Image (cartoon, rainbow, N blue to C red):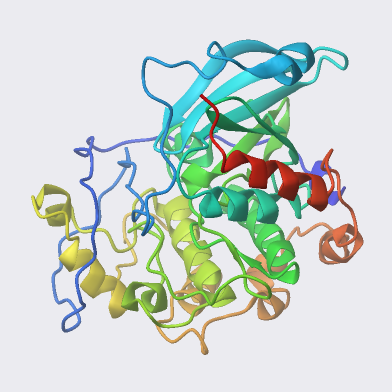
């Protein structure tokens, strides 16, 4: 693929003071556009807590219950060898494992199979329908007595958030390289009618390559929806630093333009090493409302830092993405003609998505996945 033909990566220095961890977020109704001039938080960036899903169906296994040790079934133990735990959170636990026959390393995410399975089903069905170099490959799903296990491609380079923390704000050429990959990946998802709704560096994995620039892959589809076959996209979901105005309003239909807004926010973070809309005071607010941040988002009020030079061309692109009205926001189709975006873009990049539309690399058919998820609703004891 064209993404493999670029040269070496460049490191940038990191700086500034740490931020306190953010509080849980429950957005309030937007008021008048903010006139607050407080500077946006800078590196090291604090991870931001996503909006909670409305029915809270997904919860991790109990802390004292290791899903690999409490009945992984013959399927898991015979097929995969556990290497180590590599992540944990509100979604569940993630393990690095090795396929016993092929010796391929994979990531296995365990999620609780109790309660409402609809959110898990949506994530798995949408992810399994995406086969693309800029999307972490979904391989298969299985059940343990208490968990749903998702087997996925393993990306050893960590996530893009940690990459930015390590390297600092990126050189414009390197930011473009990462942004191009994300945009092509998002365009493919949209061609498949899937809107991600929670694009951010934490949900993007990095594949490091010796003497070459890194590859990036979208990895999380927990908030995604297929706008053709699933319910209308009206829920208020996402993460404060990247959520689009139309999503914040709640009850208003939204679609692919919301992902383009998030791409604009990610581009800002790549270039400047800070969030475009997040206000320091909101991190200290005990209510967790992020009210000042919401005001800035709803009016697209952000600063162009003077201490880091970037070209007028990338500022124009960023401004075209961070437009409040989704109907006026730049589309991916328009981005293909943008001079800054097109620079050093692999020749086959635009054709890649058409070539990938009919490919499917998941080990299981949609019917097999659906049968497993139906069974998952009957929790075993």
**Image position, residue 360 (x, y; %):** 86, 50
Task: Say left or right for 192 vs 1.
Answer: left
**Image position, residue 189 (x, y; %):** 70, 63
**Image position, residue 85 (x, y; %):** 52, 17
Task: Say left or right for 350 vs 323.
Answer: right
Q: Residue at x 32, y 37 (%)?
A: 44
Image position of 74 with respect to 14: above or below:
above
Task: Say left or right for 29 vs 341.
Answer: left
Q: Does residue 45 appear in the picture of this structure?
A: yes
Closest to the observer, 63 or 31? 63
Image quadrant assignment for residue 139: top right
Q: Does residue 157 appear in the picture of this structure?
A: no
Closest to the observer, 351 or 4? 351
Q: Residue at x 38, y 80 (%)?
A: 251
**Count of numbered tags:** 0
Closest to the observer, 11 or 216? 216
Task: Say left or right for 222 vs 355.
Answer: left
Image position of 313 with respect to 121: above or below:
below
Image quadrant assignment for residue 215: top right
Image position of 156 with respect to 129: above or below:
above
Q: Residue at x 73, y 28 (%)?
A: 211
Report the residue that reaches farthest toward the left. Answer: 286
**Image position, residue 267 (x, y; %):** 50, 59
């Amino acid at each position: 693929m064209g993404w493999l033909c670029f040269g070496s990566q460049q490191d940038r220095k990191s700086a500034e003071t740490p931020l306190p961890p953010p509080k849980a977020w429950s957005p309030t109704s937007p008021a008048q556009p903010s006139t607050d001039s407080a500077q946006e938080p800078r590196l090291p960036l604090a991870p931001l807590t996503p909006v909670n899903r409305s029915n809270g169906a997904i919860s991790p296994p109990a802390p004292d219950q290791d899903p690999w040790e409490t009945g992984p079934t013959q399927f898991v133990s015979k097929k995969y060898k556990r290497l180590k735990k590599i992540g944990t959170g509100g979604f569940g636990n993630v393990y690095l494992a090795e396929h016993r026959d092929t010796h391929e390393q994979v990531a296995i995410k365990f999620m609780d199979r109790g309660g409402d399975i609809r959110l898990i089903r949506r994530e798995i069905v949408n992810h399994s329908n995406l086969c693309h170099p800029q999307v972490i490959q979904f391989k298969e799903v299985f059940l343990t007595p208490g968990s749903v296990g998702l087997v996925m491609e393993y990306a050893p380079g960590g996530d893009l958030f940690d990459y930015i923390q390590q390297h600092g704000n990126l050189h414009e050429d390197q930011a473009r390289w990462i942004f191009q990959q994300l945009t092509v990946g998002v365009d493919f998802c949209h061609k498949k009618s899937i809107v991600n709704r929670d694009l951010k560096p934490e949900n993007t994995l990095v594949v490091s390559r010796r003497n070459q620039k890194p590859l990036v892959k979208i990895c999380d589809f927990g908030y995604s929806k297929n706008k053709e076959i699933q319910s209308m996209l009206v829920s208020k979901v996402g993460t404060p630093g990247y959520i689009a105005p139309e999503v914040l309003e709640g009850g208003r239909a939204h679609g692919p333009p919301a992902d383009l807004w998030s791409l604009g926010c990610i581009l800002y973070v790549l270039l400047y090493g800070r969030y475009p809309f997040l206000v320091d005071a909101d991190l200290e607010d005990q209510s967790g409302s992020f009210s000042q941040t919401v005001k800035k988002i709803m009016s697209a009020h952000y600063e162009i830092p003077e201490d880091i030079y970037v070209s007028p061309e990338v500022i124009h692109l960023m401004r075209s993405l961070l437009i409040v009205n989704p109907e006026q926001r730049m589309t991916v189709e328009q981005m293909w003609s943008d001079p800054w975006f097109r620079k050093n873009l692999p020749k086959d990049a635009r054709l890649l998505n058409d070539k990938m539309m009919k490919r499917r690399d998941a080990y299981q058919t949609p019917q097999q996945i659906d049968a497993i998820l139906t069974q998952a609703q009957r929790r075993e004891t």
